[in-house]
Image: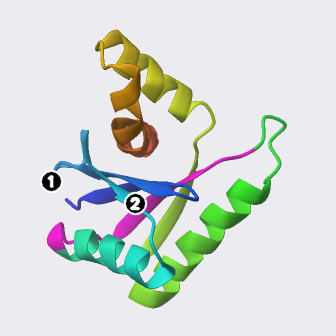
Amino acid sequence: MERFLGLDVGTKTIGVAVSDPLGITAQPVTTVIRKSNKEDFQAIKDFIDEYNIKTVIVGMPYNMNGTIGPSGEMAKKFGEKLKNKYGINIIYIDERNTTKMAEQVLISGKVRRENRKTHIDKIAAVFILETYLNMI
C-alpha cells in the first residue's frame, strides 16, 4: 500500500497532511509558510521523500458554480509544477468548504481564535486527503 500526501495550497501557506501506511486515515503534518517557489517546492519534496510519496492530492478550490477561479488556477499550477519537477502523480480534489469544516473542528475543539490560524490549513489538508481516501 502507498501513502498519500494531501495539500491545501494557498497564497501564504500550504497545509500538509499524510495518510497512514495503509491509506485509510489522514493525519495533519504541518503548515508550510510560503517564502519563495524554490523553498516551497523543497519543503514539499522533503515530505515526499520522508513518507515515500508517489501520489499527491491537491485541493482544488472551485468556485461555488463549479468553475475554476484564480485560486484554482494557482493550485493547478502548483500541482503541475510538482508533477514536472518530481515525477509524481497529482490528483485534484474539490476542496470547497474544507476550510469552513476545519474551522468548525477547531471551534468545537475549543481552540482559541488567535491559535486557529496556525492549524486551519493542515486540518483542511486532512479533509482534502480524507475525501480522496474515501473514494478509493
Q: Residue 77 carries which label?
A: none
Number of numbered callouts drawn: 2
**Residue 52 found in image quarter:** bottom left
Q: Quadrant of the N terminus?
A: bottom left
Residue type, mark 2 in image: Ile
The answer to whether 109 is drawn above or below residue 92 in the figure is: above
Q: In this figure, which residue is indicated by the disc labeled 2?
A: 33
Q: Which residue is pictured at 64% across the width and 73% down the height?
A: 77
First-in-chain label (2 vs 1): 1
Marks 2/1: CA distance?
Answer: 26 Å
Q: Does the magenta stretch include residue 27?
A: no
Q: Is residue 87 visible?
A: no
User: Which of 102/2 is in front?
Assistant: 102
**Bounds of the magenta segment:** 50-62
User: Which of 98/133 is in front?
Assistant: 98
Asked whether the beta carbons under mark 2 and mark 1 sit within 8 Å of each other, the answer is no
Secondary structure of the residue carrying tag 2 is strand
Secondary structure of the residue carrying tag 1 is loop
Residue type, mark 1 in image: Pro
Q: How crowded is mark 2: few (under 14 residues within 10 Å), some or many (20 or more)?
A: some
User: How does the figure colour the protein chain or chains?
Assistant: rainbow
**Residue 43 found in image quarter:** bottom left
Whole-percent x, y for residue 33 in the image:
40, 60
Q: Which residue is pictured at 52% across the width and 33% down the height?
A: 99
Whole-percent x, y for residue 37 in the image:
50, 80
Whole-percent x, y for residue 30 in the image:
27, 51
Q: In this figure, which residue is indicated by the disc labeled 1?
A: 21
